[in-house]
Image (spheres, rainbow, N blue to C red):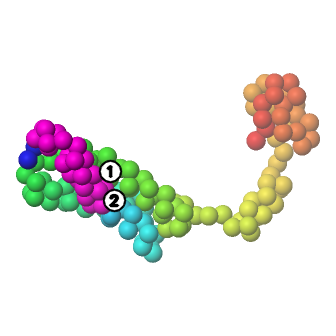
Amino acid sequence: MTYYELFQQGPMVYIPVLLISLVVTLLAYAALPIILAKTRKKIITKKKYNLLCYGINFLIMIAFIGLNGKSSGAPYIIWTGVFSSMGLRILKKRHVLDGFQPVTVEQNLQAIDASDDAPRIRFCRKCGSELLDGAKFCNKCGTEVI
């Protein structure tokens, strides 16, 4: 049955069909990225996570095409992208994403101590005027001293 035939039968028929179709699509494309992000215990790179999500969801799209006979790649691209980015945020929050390491208090204190030992910047990098001791901004041009 085509969507045109459903629309001809009225909203009592096509609204539930569209809602069921939306729910099945969301469950199919959201399940893997979210479950993988919630259950992952080992560190994973962003590239590997995205390859897993897009690869498995591609197989799901192929299964939909095989069952339905006709399908579009648009839901695959849209929903896999949306749920993969949600999964990446979950992985970051759980500290399982490679390249994201939370800074401890001790590391932060060591960085502050190391910055005290660093040589003081004496001249502004923008205008070249001499800076006062402990100045955070240039007196002449207002550029922030890093």
| Left or right relative to 104: residue 10 | left
Within-10-Å neighbours for mark 2: few <14, some 14–19, many 20+: many
- The residue at the point 84 percent across, 55 percent down is 116
Closer to us: 3 or 109: 3
- The residue at the point 89 percent across, 43 percent down is 134
Q: Quadrant of residue 26?
A: bottom left
- The residue at the point 42 percent across, 53 percent down is 85
Q: Amino acid at mark 1?
A: Trp
Closer to us: 109 or 69: 69
**Position above or below: 30 against 36:** above
Residue 32: x %, y % from top left: 32, 64
| Left or right relative to 92: residue 139 | right
Looking at the rendering, the stretch of residues picked out in magenta corresponds to 3-28
Residue 13 in magenta?
Answer: yes
Kindly identify which residue carries mark 1. 79
Q: Earlier in the sequence, mark 2 or mark 1?
A: 2
Q: Secondary structure at mark 2?
A: helix
Q: Quadrant of residue 29?
A: bottom left
Residue 74: x %, y % from top left: 24, 44
Q: Is residue 21 visible?
A: yes
- Quadrant of the frame with the C terminus: top right
**Position above or below: 111 against 5:** below
Q: Are marks 2 and 1 in contact (CB under 8 Å)?
A: yes
Tell me which secondary structure the magenta stretch mostly adopts: helix
Which numbered marker is on residue 123?
none
Closer to us: 139 or 76: 76
Q: Amino acid at mark 2?
A: Ala
Kindly identify which residue carries mark 2. 30
> Farthest residue toward the bottom?
41
Q: Secondary structure at mark 1?
A: helix
Q: Is residue 51 visible?
A: no
